[in-house]
Amino acid sequence: MPTGVNQSDRMTPKTRVAELAVAGGEPMFRQTIHVGRPNIGDRQRLRERIDDLLDRRWLTNNGQYVQEFERRVARRIGVRHVVAVCNGTVALEIAVRALGLTGEVIVPSFTFAATVHALHWLGITPVFCDVHPRTHTLDPRRVEELITPRTTGLIAVHLWGRACDVDDLSAIANRHHLKLLFDAAHAFGCSYQGRMVGNFGNAEVLSFHATKVLNTFEGGAVVTNDDDLADRLRLMRNMGFRTLDEVVSVGTNGKMSEVSAAMGLTGLESIDEFIAVNRRHYEHYRHELAGIPGITLAPVSETERSNFQYVVLDVDEAHSGISRDDLIRVLHAENIKARRYFFPGCHRMPPYRDLYPEAGASLPETERLAESVLCLPTGETLTAEDVAAICGIVRLAVSHSGELRPILSRATR
C-alpha cells in the first residue's frame, strides 16, 4: 500500500502565523491532500480480474463478478440479499419505488443531497426532520411530531458510520405502519448493538462511490432480509426483465458493471487493512487535537464496529476564536482540502429552499451543524506524520486566531 505523502512533499511543522500559506508562506503540502481519496487495494489482482472479464467479453448484465461481489458483501454483513447497482443514488431510487413510498417521507436535512433528491425525483414530498445534537442522526423525538396521514415512510441516515437510533425509529415505524429505509452510505462495515448495518428496517442502501471505504469505482447496493422485496429490486434494476425477453414490470437500467464489481472484490480483500489504517489515523487525530479550545472530534463508539472513514470536527467559534469557514480557508491554503459536511443543509439548497422556505425554523441543530462541522483527510495515502502536520495547522490557527483575523479579513476584500 502507499505509505502517504513523501517527506519531500511536506514542509517542516509551522510555529508562526507568518509561515502560514494564507499569510504568504509556502503551503505545508506540495501535493493536495483530499478528503475521500480512493482506496485501491492490490492493483495486480484488479488487473487480473479486468483481463479475465475482457477475455470472456462479459462486461455487464449480471456477470460472475457482480454475483460474486453480492455474495461476499452479503456474507460479510450477514444479510440475505445484496442487490448491486450502478450507484448509491439509483439504489435509493429503486428502494423507494420498491417499498411503494408515496406522499410524504420524513428525512433529515443534514445529509448528502442524494438522499433527498431521490424522493423529490420520484414526486414524493421530503419532510425535513432535525437531528440529535450528539449523534447527528435523525432525532426520534422530532420524527413522531412530523407524522401526518400522508406520511408513508422514514429515511434515516447512518452518519459518519455511526448508526441511527434503530430501535426507537423501528418502534415509531411499526406503531404508525410506516416503511423504514436506512441510507447506510457511510456505514459499510459498521454495527449497531453488535449487529452489522444492513440488517435493519425494510432495507438499507449502501454506496460504493470512489470516496467510500469500499469502492467499486462508482456503485451502490440495496440490502435486505425480505425475499419479496429483493425480487422486486432485482426486476427494477434490470428494466423489469424476468428472463431474457420477458418484461414483467416497470424498471430502470441500474445494473452494476463487471469492472465495477471487480474493483469491489479487490477492495473487499483489503477492507480490513483499509479500516485499520483509518483507525490508526483517527486515534492519532484524537491525540493531536486533544485540548485545542473549541475543537471537538466526533467520537466513535468503543463498543461498536466502525470503518473510521470520517474524521469529523465541530468548530465552536466562541471558544476557538476562529470560524469553521475561516479554518477551512487556512487549511485549503496549505493544500489540505478539508470539507464542509453537509453545507448548507438540504433545506437550503434549490429547489427545497424555495419549496419549503420556513423549514429552517424547525431545524436548529441542523442549522448549527451546517455552520460548524468539517471533515479532515484520512485513508491509506496518509501517514502519521501527515496527520500530525494537519493537526499542527489547526492548533496554530486556533492558538493565534486573533493574529489571523486581520489577515483573513484582508484576504476577503
Image: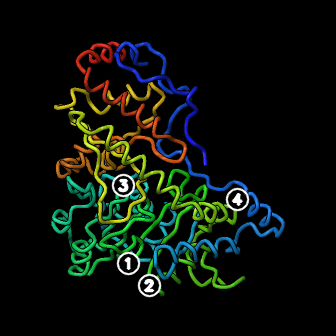
Q: Which kind of residue does numbered mark 4 sit on?
A: Leu
Q: Which kind of residue does numbered mark 2 sit on?
A: Asp
Q: Earlier in the sequence, mark 3 or mark 2?
A: 3
The span from disc 4 to disc 3 (Cα, nearest Å) is 28 Å
Q: Where residue 265 sits: x, y (%)?
A: 62, 66
Say few, some or many: other residues with alpha carbon within 10 Å of mark 3 (under 14 / 14 to 19 / 20 or more).
many
Q: Which of the numbered marks, if any, corresponds to residue 46?
A: 4
Q: Which of the numbered marks, if any, corresponds to residue 160?
A: 3
Q: Residue at x 62, y 68 (%)?
A: 255
Say few, some or many: other residues with alpha carbon within 10 Å of mark 1 (under 14 / 14 to 19 / 20 or more).
some
Classify the position of the C terminus by image quarter.
top left
Quadrant of res 219: bottom right
Left or right, 306 with respect to 26, comes to left
Q: Secondary structure at mark 3?
A: helix
Q: Where residue 199 sits: x, y (%)?
A: 39, 76
Please name the residue that numbered disc 1 is placed on: 202
Nearest-to-viewer mark from 3 and 2:
3
Residue that extends furthest to the right in the rendered view of this protein: 55
Proximity of marks 4 and 1: CB atoms separated by less than 8 Å: no
Q: Which of the numbered marks, if any, corresponds to residue 226?
A: 2
Q: Secondary structure at mark 2?
A: loop
Q: Secondary structure at mark 4?
A: helix
